[in-house]
Amino acid sequence: MRFSRLSLGAQTAYAELLEQTQGLEIQRHLGHLAGSFQRKRIKGHWYWYFAYRDLDGGMRFVYVGPDGERVASLIERFRSEKHVSTKARARAVIALGCSPLVPQHYRVIKRLADYGFFRAGGVLVGTHAFVALGNALGVRWTEADRTLDVDFAHAGRNVSIGLPATIRVDVHEALTSLEMGLLPITQFTGNVGARYRNPKDPDLRLDFVTTRHRGDPVHVPNLNVALQPLKFMEFMLEETTQGLALCAEGATVVNLPTPARYAVHKLIVHGERPLREHAKAVKDLQQAAALATYFLDERPTDFRKAWRDAVGRGAGWRRRAEQGRAALVRLEPGLDSPKLWGRRSR
């Protein structure tokens, strides 16, 4: 089995911790501002923002979350939320079975969150997102949940597919303030690079990526970081959700790809990996298999919708997606079900 289900108690505790952490972060970041909450429609989906005027008189929008009962409830009571530590509750959630991140990796994610990276439209991707999605879905993965890379994405200049905000975030300063020896090892035209490494510590690698378009690479002034363009990345960034980066040291809210789009994206990029990245290609397939197995039993329509979106984007997309599907079915024959893929054309 590619995952084990968390107990009802663990799922309830996680949901309560997510709501508490969101409330605390809204209060910390917005409680001192005079403004109002506004709902915006982006790419067919509704999202909530907090609108306020900056010192220069310009209108600013801070991302709050996707439209839904949970976010609406948080908005109603955010001003009355008291500041309490999430550490004890995070430890309790982990004790009940939720999967934590490595403390060293969590500290990086938390620092970027504190600096506003996720409020400015940043998205946690890669294996850490896979772990966070498992907790949000109420499962614990049994494989493909370990990595040395911490991967972040942002829509960059293509804000129409992201979660736009006009606040400034200094990613480079945030990473430097951790004093973990992280250095930008890739620099484009004199700008801060898209990859950070500590030459003395091989167990921590950071990558910042964005969608592929002309004029690569991309430097985003309001983030103070360059973003490495990757093919097909827009598929994961077009719809996002929120979840927790979890550790015994606490919890922080992050933007995540929706689970179905994450799974289908892994199928698309599986065959794109060069030979030197064979291990990553295997992990892509394992993560897709774990999520597809979950969706087969729980929410097949979500997966089917994401799949149809991918194969409907043109011949190149369809060819890669079908290659990934064939590899997935070879790995897990039970996933060859019309519940997931729908009726395929002959």
Image: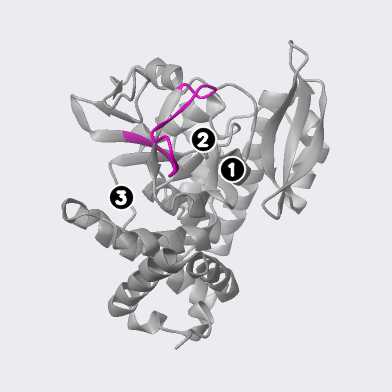
Residue to which mark 1 is pinned = 162
Residue 194's x, y, as percent? 36, 30
Residue sitting nearer the eye, 294 or 319 = 319
Mark 1 or mark 2: which comes first in sequence? 2
Give the spatial CA distance, label 2 vs label 3: 27 Å
| Residue type indicated by callout 2 | Gly
The numbered disc on residue 146 is 3
Mark 2 or mark 3: which comes first in sequence? 3
* Mark 3–mark 1 CB contact (< 8 Å): no
Q: Is residue 260 left or right of residue 226?
A: right
Residue sitting nearer the eye, 169 or 93 = 169
Q: Quadrant of residue 325?
A: bottom left
- Please report the bounds of the magenta region as a residue range: 206-224
Give the spatial CA distance, label 1 vs label 2: 8 Å
Per the image, label 3 sits on a secondary structure element best described as loop
Residue 38's x, y, as percent? 80, 38
Classify mark 2: residues with Cα within 10 Å, few (<14), some (14-19) or many (20+). Answer: many
> Is residue 89 one of those drawn in magenta?
no
Relative to 300, is 280 above or below?
above
Residue to which mark 2 is pinned = 156
> Is residue 214 one of those drawn in magenta?
yes
